[in-house]
Image (cartoon, rainbow, N blue to C red):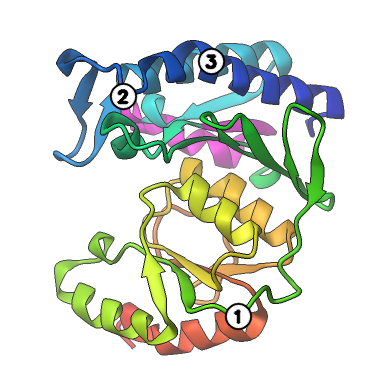
Amino acid sequence: MIPTLQQESDLIEAVRSAARTEILPRFRNLGADAVAEKTNADDLVTIGDRASEASIAAAVRRILPGAEVVGEEAVSENPEILGRIAGADTCVIIDPIDGTWNFAKGLALFGVLLAVTHRGETVFGLLYDPVLDDWVLSRRGGGTWFCDPAGRRDRLDVRDGGEPTGFAGFASPWLLPEHQRARFATGVLDYGRVRDLGCACHDYRMLCFGVGRFGFAMKLMPWDHAAGVLAYSEAGGHVGMLDGRSYAPTLHQGIMISARDADTLADLRAKFAWLRGE
């Protein structure tokens, strides 16, 4: 099932509702017992993540009956859920708070990501900013749009090249194995200033707005990337795996590169081929 326009609108409203009721009331209002570690001290989950995911998942089941739902927190509890994306006719992938560390530390740089896949291919993506209540949405073959509740709808297209700037893009060297971090960081800084926002939602939003020429993804969880890859691709960007494969939300290992144009993607693949042992 590919969502209708009404179903897309209902999904957006479900995310906005979860932000109003489950996320924003807890922002800068989390007690010590409302934050827990998952894999390490920097990999956090909050009561807001769990409540937001439960709210959105319940709404998804009403809006798209029969769709599989794959949420980050559900997978954390049961990793087998992750395998449902590949076999589902329709699957909704949810990151209930992307940038949880920022959220937990009181930094207003977090978002909600939602993607709908049809037989393993992303067909709808939503990148929502709860703080400002605006969003970037994309449809397979339908472009990428910046929207707000007042009715603003601006089509995003990165192919004009943007204004000259020394800001190169987004990368998280610390996600690489320790023995690769210094060489990668030195190499990527050859292109200019590089930042790690700690929030894939806002990385992709910035790329879709034409800010930066590239982004590296070192960790391929589908809730971090399915919506953003569709949005950037529909905005005219080029996305692919370091090893030359196309990205799909069923790929969970490897390094992915998002680039403003094909030449930049090819250049980055060549320059950082050593990350693959070449």
Q: What amino acid does circle 1 point to? A: Pro
* Residue 37, x across and y down, in percent: 18, 30
Q: Nearer the viewer, mark 3 or mark 1?
A: 1
Q: Which residue was labeled with disc 2?
A: 77
Residue 50 visible in this rendered orientation of the protein: yes
Question: Element type at marker 2?
Answer: helix
Q: What amino acid does circle 2 point to? A: Glu
Question: Element type at marker 1?
Answer: loop
| Residue drawn at 15 percent across, 75 percent down | 179
Residue 220 magenta-drawn?
Answer: no
Dot label at residue 164: 1
Please determine whether, in this image, residue 275 is positioned above or below residue 8: below
In the visual, does 196 lie left or right of 207?
Answer: left
Calculate the distance from the C-alpha at mark 3 to the C-alpha at mark 2: 25 Å
Q: Which residue was labeled with disc 3?
A: 20
Please determine whether, in this image, residue 255 is positioned above or below residue 189: above
Q: What amino acid does circle 3 point to? A: Arg
Q: Nearer the viewer, mark 1 or mark 2?
A: 1
Q: Quadrant of residue 18?
A: top right
Decide which of 201, 230 is in the foreground and name it.
201
* Residue 109, x across and y down, in percent: 42, 41
Question: Element type at marker 3?
Answer: helix
Which contiguous range is marked in magenta? 76-94
